[in-house]
Amino acid sequence: MTTPAKRLATEIQSPAATRPYDVEAIRADFPILRRQIHGHPLVYLDNAATSQKPQVVIDALTRYYESENANIHRGVHYLSEHATEEYEAARESVRAFLNAEAAHEIIFTRGATESINLVGQTYGRAHVGPGDEILITAMEHHSNIVPWQILCGEKGASLRVAPINDAGELLLDGFASLLSARTKLVAVTHVSNALGTIVPVRQIVDLAHARNVPVFLDGAQAVPHLPVDVRSLGCDFYAFSGHKVYGPTGIGVLYGKSALLEAMPPYQGGGDMISSVTFEHTTYNKLPYKFEAGTPNVSGAIGLGAAIAYVNRLGIEAIGAHGREILARATAAVSAIPGVRLIGTAKEKAGVLSFVLENVHPHDVGTILDQEGIAIRTGHHCAQPVMQRFGVPATARASFALYNTIEEVNALAAGIRKVQEVFA
Ligand SMILES: Cc1ncc(COP(=O)(O)O)c(C=O)c1O
């Protein structure tokens, strides 16, 4: 049997970025894309909510449960040791994917949401006090607002919000002017899920670090589209969800710099996060286990490892280039339709096309497109403050992945015209 370490080494050494990007061959890797919905071929454009899974990820999950299932870290028997190796190989895959310095800086969580709550309840509780401030932006997902609000409420601190312009771009001067001696943490999205804006996070890190303020980056929408190098970004924390990058649900990642993670109190208590327990006193396990209480999502981590290997085989640069072309074509096609207003027109965008249609509620747009087999998302996208900023109750959002095609973009545009005919 190939060991997990050997398999990982082969995967890392053989990026396929030099091969031409063959979207039809790639689509064949995703069984769900062969489905018909309401008698039409599925056009799946809800990738910012969750991505579809390639066969290699489905196979990794099946293989694990069919022939490898065991609890990890505490068995001396073969299966337990093998499952542990697979789980830790997945951690190493994530480390390499983010270019973190050490595997122990990668904590497995349930997803981006849990990663953010973890930082709030550990780092945040330890470092934020009355009168302090946490600085976010006006384009955050609720996941990167509410945990900080809870912390501020507990501690008598306040949430400050850096403004965005009408294109949905962060106003860096406004951001800089909100940084002060009271700022204890900056928490910013790398890519906006509602607008698609790519935030200049390197500049944000520089501005915050100039004032010794640590930076948390929410990479849930960035990781599927952009190469992410946490060391060159210089961020202190980085979070993402496996299911948005072709992995399973229920698994996510928190990256944190060693020194910060070492100094943080644990998040949850339980098995595996301890090194010794008496009724009087508990000492905690070393990193990363201190933050992984209880039986973790072993199959999820292994599935995420398989998803990262898949992304690496295509090459994140090639995926990004394909995504830029699809988004550019979609932007041109949809904005050419009379009565369409794009919400989010930043110069730097990834993956997301949000829009509203004159005299038609976004839910009606979504429902009629669904009848054509086209899956988009409508609503506030867990970003109600963004909707308020743009004066709309909701938008229709098409979001793209590595398997989407120009034909699907054309189907979206044709579908929107059909919506208009229905409402004419
Ligand atoms: C920018 C952003 N942050 C955080 C999240 C939360 O991710 P999850 O629900 O997978 O924890 C999402 C999900 O849509 C998101 O788009």
Image: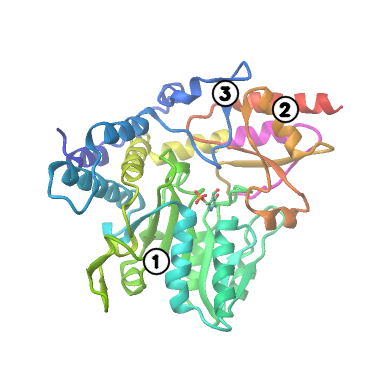
Instruction: Judge from the rendering whether residue 142 lies leftward or rightward of residue 206; answer left or right.
Output: right
In the image, is residue 257 part of the stretch drawn in magenta?
A: no
Q: Which residue is drawn at 70% across and 25% down?
A: 415
Three-letter residue code for mark 2? Ile
Query: Where does the magenta region start and end?
Result: 327-347
Mark 1 and mark 3 lie on one chain; the one further toward the N terminus is 3
Q: 177 above or below 375?
A: below
The relative height of residue 309 versus residue 131 in the rendered view (above or below) is: above
Q: Name the residue under label 3.
A: 42
* Element at label 1: loop
Snapshot quadrant of residue 247: top left
Q: Is mark 2 on a helix, strand or loop?
A: helix
Task: Classify residue 109 as left or right of residue 166.
Answer: left
Q: Residues within 10 Å of mark 2 (few under 14, many from 20)?
A: some
- Residue 341 part of the magenta-drawn span: yes
Disc marking residue 135: none
Q: Is residue 416 left or right of residue 173?
A: right
Say which element carries label 3: loop
One can see residue 324 in this view? yes
Mark 1–mark 3 distance (CA, rounded to whole Å): 41 Å
Residue matched to label 2: 368
Numbered disc in front, either 2 or 1: 1
Residue 168 in the image, given as x and y percentages of width and height:
66, 54
